[in-house]
Structures are given as C-alpha cells and as structure tokens.
Image (spheres, rainbow, N blue to C red):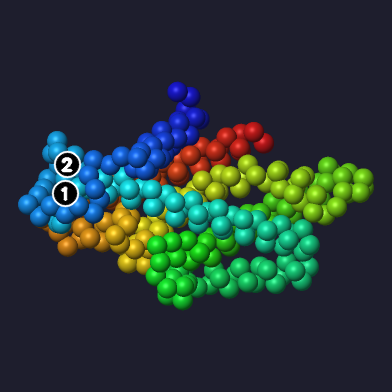
Amino acid sequence: MKKENRELVIGTAITAIVLLMAIVSFFYTPYDITFMNIAERSQPPSWAHPAGTDNMGRDILSRLMVGSRFTLLVALGTVIGSTLAGSVLGMVSGYIGGWTDEVIMRLIDAVNSFPGLLIALVIVTVLDYGKYTIIPALCIMFIPSYTRIVRMGVMQCKEAEFVKNYRVFGASDVRLLTVHIFPNIMPQLFSSIIIGLSNAILAESSMSYLGLGIQPPAPSWGWMLNEAQGTIFKSPWYAVSSGIMIVITIVGFNCIGEGLRKKYARSL
C-alpha cells in the first residue's frame, strides 16, 4: 500500500463496514430492537448477544445496526442541505461581490457568533421534537463553512482566463457559475463535504445524547450513550459499544476527507 494512499484506503474500508451495517439493518437484525427481555437484561457479550444487552434486555448489536441507519441518514441530510444552501450563497456572494457579498457574509458571521448547540436547541424547540427535526437545525450550523469555501473558490476562478474567454463569447452569468466555475471548486468542496459528514455525526450524537436528536423508540448512537450512562459501571459494554461506533465512523470519514485533500493538493 502506498503511503500517500493509506488514509484514503483505511477510511474507505472503515466507512464501507459502517455503511454495510446500515444497509443490512433494513433487511435483517439479530433481534427486534424494541423487544425487552427482562430475564436477560444487562448481559455481557456472548454468542447469543455479541455486544451484550442493555438494562431493558434489548440486544445491543441490533440497536447499533439500526442506529447506524438513523445516524448516517441525519448526517447525510445535514451535509446535503447545508452544502446546497451554502453553495448558492457562496456563488452569489463571491461572483456578484459588493453590497451583496457584504450582506451575505455579515449574515454568515451573525450565525457563527452564536454557539451552534444554542442555535440547534432553539430550532428544534420551535419546530417541535420530531424524528428528523434535528436535520434543519444542524443544516443551519453547517451552512457558514460551505458558504465560505464556495465563495473563496468563486472569487479565485471568476477572474481566471478561461472564465474571461467564455464571457467574451457571450456565456451568461448563470452558465459561467454552474458549468465553468463550480466544477473547478468541486474537488476542494468534496473533501470538505466528507469531513463535514464526520462533524455532522458528532453533532447529531451530541444532540441525541442531550435528548434533542432522534427520538425514541428509534435508536441513535448518541441516545444509546445517554441510556448507558446510568449503568456504565454495571454494564460498561453498552456505553463502550455505542461510543466505539461513533469514534470509528468519525475516524473513517476524516481519513477519507484527509486522503482526498492530499490527493487534490498533489494534483495541483
């Protein structure tokens, strides 16, 4: 394995395992995630329950599998929504400039001036607690970073020779932005999107741990950590297993993002 490809390969392998777990959970789980067996509560890992059982006798492995589905779905929805909104704002701000740029960037600064957790708390409260209410809340937290990335890329590209040539031949501003400028920003943006997935997973887990994310009975890794804290000394495998899933998934996406960043930097 080439040294420069190691992070990308390792990250891809880790992420593939987590994605496979999420996909398999749609068709199969060892046990029903809501089935409570009081006689087997707080059981350590065994052949029957490879990750043990929680304080209600539910199979932890099954809940981890289904939890991966909800956690990844929230992270993906957050990144897609914030990337789309941030890309539009960044392109408009960077291309038009002037007062438009000033207004948009001051709004972005205003969003950044508030703690992200406070913003998410307010939005979740306003929208009421639903299964996926956390997605728009996290989107607003992530929009500023993507806006700045796209804005910087547009400002660098809009004065490039190839853009001036297309402008001379009558290309419209919309065509210049969408067909000629934005594709040149994509390599840099894509690595930020991958890293953004790991940040979104961490944010979702933190919110769910506080009871503001995915709502029961749907499992989430963060909520599982919340449930495990009461029995962490009696049955530590519950907290350890859900914590490990959060950590390795974040590490996987970070490795992919860093590998893509280095690959992009070498190609310049």
When the figure is inspected, residue 168 is found, relative to residue 134, above or below; the finding is above
| Foreground pick, 22 / 106 | 22
Could you tell me which secondary element the residue under label 1 belongs to? loop
The numbered disc on residue 49 is: 2
Count of numbered circles on the image:
2
Amino acid carrying mark 1 in the image? Thr
Q: Residue furthest left?
A: 39
**Can I make out residue 240 in this image?**
no
Which part of the image, by quadrant, shows the N terminus?
Answer: top left
**x then y, percent, for residue 22:** 37, 43
**x then y, percent, for residue 204:** 40, 58
Is 230 on the left or on the right of 125, as rendered?
left
Circle 2 residues within 10 Å: few <14, some 14–19, many ≥20: some
| Foreground pick, 258 / 141 | 141
The numbered disc on residue 53 is: 1
**Can I make out residue 218 in this image?**
yes
**x then y, percent, for residue 97:** 77, 64
C-alpha separation, residue under disc 2 versus residue under disc 1? 7 Å
Residue found at x 58% / y 73%: 110
Amino acid carrying mark 2 in the image? His
Could you tell me which secondary element the residue under label 2 belongs to? loop
| Foreground pick, 55 / 7 | 55
| Pointers 2 and 1 in contact (C-beta within 8 Å) | yes
Circle 1 residues within 10 Å: few <14, some 14–19, many ≥20: many
**x then y, percent, for residue 201:** 41, 53
Residue found at x 34% / y 63%: 215
The numbered disc on residue 5 is: none
